[in-house]
Image (spheres, coloured by chain):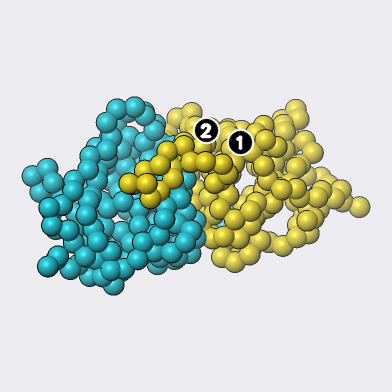
Chain colours: A yellow, B cyan
Amino acid sequence: MPVQIKAEALTATRFAPFGDVLDFAGKPDKIINQGMCGRFHNRAKVTHIDGQSGISLFDSAPRQLPYRLEMMERHPLGSQAFLPMTEAPFLVTVAEDQNGRPGHPIAFLTEPYMGVNYHANIWHGVLTPLSKPGRFSVIDRIGSGANLEEYWFEETYIITD
Amino acid sequence: MPVQIKAEALTATRFAPFGDVLDFAGKPDKIINQGMCGRFHNRAKVTHIDGQSGISLFDSAPRQLPYRLEMMERHPLGSQAFLPMTEAPFLVTVAEDQNGRPGHPIAFLTEPYMGVNYHANIWHGVLTPLSKPGRFSVIDRIGSGANLEEYWFEETYIITD
């Protein structure tokens, strides 16, 4: 029997060991544009060991819950942010490192207008939208070199809501 | 009588002198995640003369068409990208520089899943969503120093659809 993991609500506190939650909680840091716009300023730790940070777009097929988590990956050379271009929640899975492989995964469900930034070298599952279209803005390191490490579990996990 | 400007459909070709259009047109540059996800790779010229690029979120009050364009601004020290977190179109206004002030503005309307990246020092109007909530991911230069120049028109323009 695969181990079941219940997805919990994504919060900045709970997610802090893995990265940043980008959302509209609380007051904006600055009011700009003649009072018309709130700026939630510089909310992610964007890093790249070499190369530079760039903007890409991802269009991912949706998955559904319960979801079988078979693999996690990490990017040693830089952070990676996912910001949704739709209002649909998506699934976020992360794990602490345990001797070079992911430990027990933790699963989160986002709310609308909420993105995540995985810090460099943090184990995470691939992008898992739960509805169509699974379209996201992605800010990550652009550069050459090996920036992808995958780990396939011997025993998979089942993520439920 | 204010000069009227008709907003046109946003296309990469037409926008090229001002910046990058980020969208899902054409084929993705890479297929990743075991065939489940298309990556439209590194689609924007992200620059910062000093400091670094960071991720912020903007929450802007919506405007409506016809829209009175009274001011344009530019950021000499870096690019600025706006990627919508909703599927609603928004208004984009840009102008070529004319002796240190914006020339005749050009207006564009986006389609869903389409963002823009203004290159450094390009005159543009402030963020103008056309429906609520006006929520965007913003990638721009984080740093100190004067990175905002505003120009208020003596005679305003009216943008129509």
Decide: few, some or many residues near mark 2? Use Cα within 10 Å; few <14, some 14-19, many ≥20. Answer: some
Residue positioned most to the bottom: B161
Residue drawn 78% across the image and 56% down it = A161
Measured along the vertical axis of the image, is residue B15 above or below residue B55?
below
> Where B73 falls versus B3 (above or below)?
above
> Who comes first in sequence, dot 1 or dot 2?
1
| Farthest residue, direction left | B99
Question: Which of the 4 image quadrants contains residue A79?
Answer: top right
Q: Which residue is situated farthest in the right direction here?
A: A1
Q: Position of residue B3 (x, y in %)?
A: 14, 66
Given residues A91 and A52, the one toward you in this image is A91
Mark 2 lies on residue: A45
Which residue is painted at 76% across and 50% down in the image? A7
The image quadrant where one finds the C terminus of chain B is bottom left
Q: Callout 1: helix, strand or loop?
A: strand
Q: What amino acid is labelled 2 in the image?
A: Lys
| Element marked by disc 2 | loop
Disc number placed over residue A19 in the picture, else none? 1
Front residue of B79/A103: it is B79
A73 left or right of A57 in image? right
- Residue found 46% across the figure and 50% down from its top: B59
The spot of residue B54 in percent (x, y) is 44, 37
Establish whether labels 1 and 2 are both on one chain: yes
Quadrant of residue B112 within the rendered picture: bottom left
**Residue A5 visible, this orientation:** yes
Give the amino acid type for the residue marked by disc 1 in the picture.
Gly
